[in-house]
């Protein structure tokens, strides 16, 4: 049960807290990993920790050419991509009235456009193999919004629609497409939140604490398995009850 032996997984944003936890979980379940990110030293550190069944691919997802090269290189080495986890994301926070076009475009490109391009690219072989798991990492902000993050919220909300539409298109080929929307999770991104605001946010979470990356990774692990084959087009909120949607 919950065995990923023989499966090849591509995880983007593998150098972050959540991405690293996802990589560790899928590796523990037996998957062979292609880890993508922009911080090469962090990728190497993670690979040294995992030791085997790991290939590293430095890639900046703001380039359509780089994304296609990433898919081609992974498929050339592994022969296939069974599992895609679109985890990479960036923020360029500001109030809407002060947000620049560049800040808007950067976030939309990496957080929404790149997942689309990756999904489109990997699904071709998944269709031929009649098996695939695509998991998009969104955010609670995509469902409820957040002041100062119009770009980030729009992109993460866009992943909901992208997930559902792709799920409808690919379901008949035994490919599931799901989305996980984490709430407040311990990570370098959440570390930037001032302590006073963090305390206030924690009081709003029914379980009384901020989540940890492993709790998101566990959800990714399950959705990657054969046992999750009857779940598709679903938005799974991992947020401690902060938003019951």
Image (tube, rainbow, N blue to C red):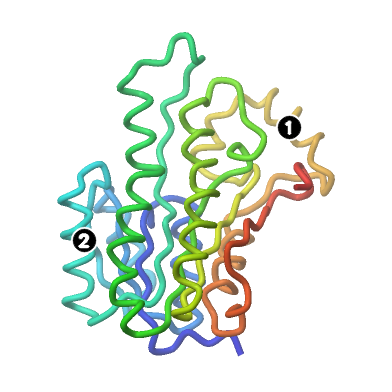
C-alpha distance separating marks 2 and 1: 38 Å
Q: Position of residue 124 (x, y in %)?
A: 29, 72
The first of marks 2 and 1 along the sequence is 2
Name above or below for residue 26 compared with residue 142.
below
Categorize mark 2 by other alpha carbons within 10 Å: few (<14), some (14-19), many (20+).
Answer: many
- Residue located at (25% from left, 65% from top): 56
Per the image, label 1 sits on a secondary structure element best described as helix
- Residue located at (48% from left, 33% from top): 152
- Which quadrant is the N terminus positioned in? bottom right
- Residue located at (37% from left, 52% from top): 115
Determine whether, in the image, residue 68 is placed left or right of residue 120: left
Q: Which residue is mark 1?
A: 201
Q: Quadrant of residue 232?
A: bottom right
- Residue located at (23% from left, 61% from top): 57
Determine whether, in the image, residue 170 is placed left or right of residue 178: left
Q: Quadrant of residue 213?
A: bottom right
Name above or below for residue 142 compared with residue 28.
above
Closer to the camera, 120 or 200? 120
Categorize mark 1 by other alpha carbons within 10 Å: few (<14), some (14-19), many (20+).
Answer: some
Closer to the camera, 109 or 174? 174
For the view shown, which residue lies furthest in the right direction?
206
Q: Position of residue 26 (x, y in %)?
A: 47, 74
For the view shown, which residue lies furthest in the top direction?
97
Q: Which residue is mark 2?
A: 70
Per the image, label 2 sits on a secondary structure element best described as helix
Q: Position of residue 42 (x, y in %)?
A: 32, 54
Q: Position of residue 130 (x, y in %)?
A: 40, 84
Give the numbered dot on residue 13.
Answer: none
């Amino acid at each position: 049960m919950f065995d990923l032996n023989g499966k090849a997984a591509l995880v983007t944003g593998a150098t972050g807290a959540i991405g690293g936890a996802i990589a560790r979980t899928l590796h523990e379940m037996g998957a062979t990993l292609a880890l993508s990110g922009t911080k090469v030293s962090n990728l190497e550190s993670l690979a040294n920790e995992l030791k085997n069944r790991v290939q590293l691919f430095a890639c900046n997802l703001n380039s359509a050419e780089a994304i296609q090269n990433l898919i081609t290189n992974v498929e050339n080495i592994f022969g296939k991509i069974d599992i895609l986890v679109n985890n990479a994301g960036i923020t360029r926070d500001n109030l809407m009235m002060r947000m620049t076009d560049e800040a808007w475009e950067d976030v939309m490109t990496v957080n929404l456009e790149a997942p689309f391009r990756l999904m489109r690219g990997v699904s071709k072989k998944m269709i031929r193999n009649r098996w695939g798991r695509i998991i998009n990492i969104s955010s609670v902000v995509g469902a409820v919004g957040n002041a100062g993050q119009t770009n980030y919220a729009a992109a993460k909300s866009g992943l909901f629609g992208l997930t559902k539409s792709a799920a409808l298109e690919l379901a008949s080929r035994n490919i599931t497409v799901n989305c996980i929307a984490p709430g407040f999770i311990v990570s370098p991104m959440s570390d930037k939140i001032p302590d006073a605001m963090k305390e206030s946010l924690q009081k709003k979470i029914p379980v009384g604490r901020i989540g940890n990356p492993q709790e998101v990774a566990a959800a990714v692990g399950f959705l990657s398995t054969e046992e999750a084959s009857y779940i598709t087009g679903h938005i799974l909120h991992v947020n401690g009850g902060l938003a019951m949607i």
